[in-house]
Amino acid sequence: MSVLIVGSVALDYLETPFGKMEQALGGSATFCSVSASYLTEDVRCVGIVGSDFPEEHIRFLTSRKIDLLGLVREAEGKTFSWGGRYHDDMNTRDTLYTELGVFEHFHPVIPEEWKKSEFVLLGNIHPSLQMEVLEQIEEPRLVVCDTMNLWINISKKELKAVLKKVDVLILNDEEARMLTDERNLIVAGQKMLRMGPKVVVIKKGEHGAVLMSKDSYFSAPAFPLEGIKDPTGAGDTFAGGFIGWLARTGDVSVANMRKAVVYGSALASFCVEEFSIDGIRALTPEQLAERFATFRTISSF
């Protein structure tokens, strides 16, 4: 089934204790789309890039059978770019610069033939842009929303308006506490469910992820990795894998969302093993199946 993904497409500078990379392919829509493409064939990407966006990145995205009809390429202006330096613990980072470029004036326009998309992933962009997307979509089966601490800080009112219209909210533990002013994640999850979503997924980094609905609670572990090179895009990769599995199966039950959490976690674990998109650039079905099976093994008793 079709998955519509809206977010940023970027060229980033990344620096970690394991090296650095310039002009790295990034952005929420990029990681989400590539991740989803491993689980479902009809992935539709909406975003904007500048004249400096390398053609090789376009070729890669289309090689993953990602439909770029909704990707606008401005003849003038530069692609959105973010620079970040990660500390030794890989959990904290410094933002070195943010250059919005053409993204500063981005307003998502959904192609007419995509307005009936069944599954919609609102990537990590300003809540007002997420609302613009929702106003263009006709009766989707499932809407998943991702967000971040910046939007909670500066646009909480707009974000809460979006949450009234989505089915699933994905965010990390720090963001959950910020949004709800609650320290306990169980209490925070219950509070977020009352804001509108039927399901809340809280990512906890190296401690896994939890899924909460009105009547259920599910916790998945993190994959035991020996080395992490670059955490950039891991959360977006998780979200793409999550909705990709739901679209593949056409099953939006909470029970199936448990599997979706594991598929999202499996793909995110590949992502952090390399810089930029390289960890999920060329996975095989066998690699993904093996990692999913390992998740099943380490969480079974």
Image: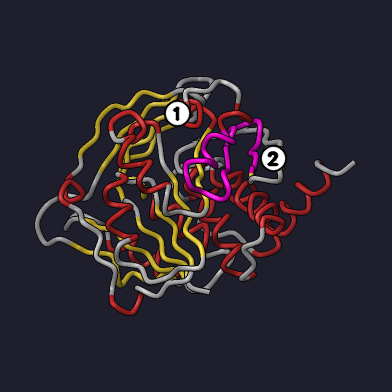
Q: Camera-side residue: 24 or 7?
A: 7
Residue 115 in the figure: left or right of residue 36: left
- Kindly identify which residue carries mark 1: 16
Q: Camera-side residue: 77 or 130?
A: 130
- Is residue 42 visible from the viewing direction of this image? yes
Q: Amino acid at mark 1?
A: Thr
What colouring method underlies this structural image? secondary structure
How far across and down, in percent of the image, does residue 111 sit? Answer: 28, 73
Magenta-highlighted residues: 189-212
Residue 63 in the figure: left or right of residue 100: right
Q: Secondary structure at mark 1?
A: strand
- Eyeballing the image, is 245 above or below 84? below
Q: Secondary structure at mark 2?
A: loop
Residue at the location (23% across, 56% down)?
49
How far across and down, in percent of the image, does residue 80 sit? Answer: 24, 46
Say the numbered circle drawn on residue 219. Answer: none
Q: Picture quarter containing residue 152?
A: top left
- Kindly identify which residue carries mark 2: 223
Q: Is residue 208 found inside the magenta-colored segment of the image?
A: yes
- Eyeballing the image, is 225 above or below 112? above
Q: Amino acid at mark 2?
A: Phe
Residue at the location (54% across, 40% down)?
272
Residue 213 in the figure: left or right of residue 36: right
User: For the image shown, how many numbered marks are present on the structure?
Assistant: 2
- Is residue 64 visible from the viewing direction of this image? no
Give the mark nearest the N terminus, 1 or 2: 1
- Residue projecting furthest to the bottom: 113
